[in-house]
Image (cartoon, rainbow, N blue to C red):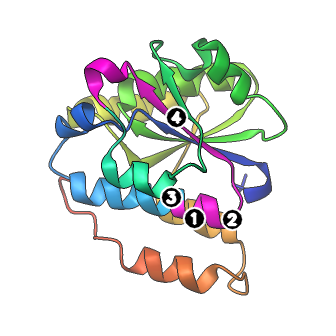
């Protein structure tokens, strides 16, 4: 099943300053991928929302991300690990967009719980693996494996953008293809 822009909703999970500081050394590559995903969603009219887990303790959204999202993306504060367990967020994740794409931190906590809850609610869930991270690479890997076993689909930022575009004649193709080409390459510890 391909990811379709007209059916998608992007959820950026807990990309906050204190959490991000604890992530693995691939941070510059990781943030570049998140920003490209957000940029592509905006260009292709894919609705997005962002969450902040306990912002008083874990800080605000990353400054680069907060600037990129500006006022166009609603930001939800939560205390629950699963986005679905928060009533306002659960309502925001409803509607006619049946493909929900998740990116953020941490893969094995909030991303995993949200993905499994959404799957249980009948949504087609995609976790953008190279736009998710955990403090420990083993937690990230195990969470991706578990989600795959549970029927959550895994994708990359690049494959997602090209699936949203669908055609090299798309008006945003050149802009987004150039942005993908300019992404920092993922290294062995990225």
Residue 44: mark: 2
Alpha carbons under labels 1 and 4: distance apart = 25 Å
Q: Residue at x 63, y 81 (%)?
A: 173
Q: Is residue 150 left or right of residue 51?
A: right
Callout 4: SS: helix
Alpha carbons under labels 4 and 2: distance apart = 27 Å
Task: Check disc 1 and report the residue beneath it.
Answer: 40
Callout 2: SS: loop
Residues marked 1 and 2 touching at CB (< 8 Å): yes
Instruction: Check the image and name the residue furthest to the front.
Output: 71
Residue 148: mark: 4
Between circles 3 and 4, the one closer to the viewer is 3
Q: Residue at x 61, y 19 (%)?
A: 84
Q: Is residue 3 left or right of residue 131?
A: right
Task: Check disc 3 and report the residue beneath it.
Answer: 37
Alpha carbons under labels 3 and 4: distance apart = 21 Å
Q: Answer with mark 3 or mark 4, whichever residue precedes in sequence.
A: 3
Q: Quadrant of the C terminus?
A: bottom left
Q: Is residue 164 left or right of residue 149?
A: right
Start and end of the magenta stretch?
Answer: 39-59
Name the one closer to the observer, 69 or 186.
69
Residue 54: horizontal and vertical position, in percent? 37, 18
Q: Answer with mark 2 or mark 3, whichever residue precedes in sequence.
A: 3
Alpha carbons under labels 2 and 3: distance apart = 11 Å
Residue 104: horizontal and vertical position, in percent? 41, 39
Q: Residue at x 52, y 80 (%)?
A: 177
Residue 103: mark: none
Does 58 appear in magenta?
yes
């Amino acid at each position: 099943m391909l990811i379709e822009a007209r059916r998608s909703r992007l959820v950026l999970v807990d990309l906050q300053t204190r959490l991000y500081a604890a992530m693995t050394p691939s941070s510059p590559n990781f943030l570049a991928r998140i920003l490209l995903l957000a940029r592509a969603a905006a260009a292709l009219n894919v609705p997005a929302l962002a969450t902040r887990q306990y912002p008083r303790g874990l800080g605000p959204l990353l400054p680069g991300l907060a600037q990129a999202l500006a006022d166009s993306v609603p930001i939800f504060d939560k205390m629950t690990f699963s986005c679905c367990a928060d009533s306002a967020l659960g309502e925001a994740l409803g509607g006619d967009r049946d493909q929900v794409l998740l990116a953020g931190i941490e893969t094995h906590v909030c991303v995993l719980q949200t993905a499994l809850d959404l799957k249980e609610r009948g949504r087609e869930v995609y976790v953008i693996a190279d736009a998710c991270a955990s403090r420990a690479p083993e937690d990230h890997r195990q969470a991706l494996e578990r989600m795959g076993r549970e029927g959550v689909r895994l994708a990359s930022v690049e494959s997602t953008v090209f699936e949203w575009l669908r055609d090299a004649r798309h008006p945003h193709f050149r802009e987004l293809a150039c942005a993908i080409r300019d992404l920092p390459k993922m290294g062995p510890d990225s």
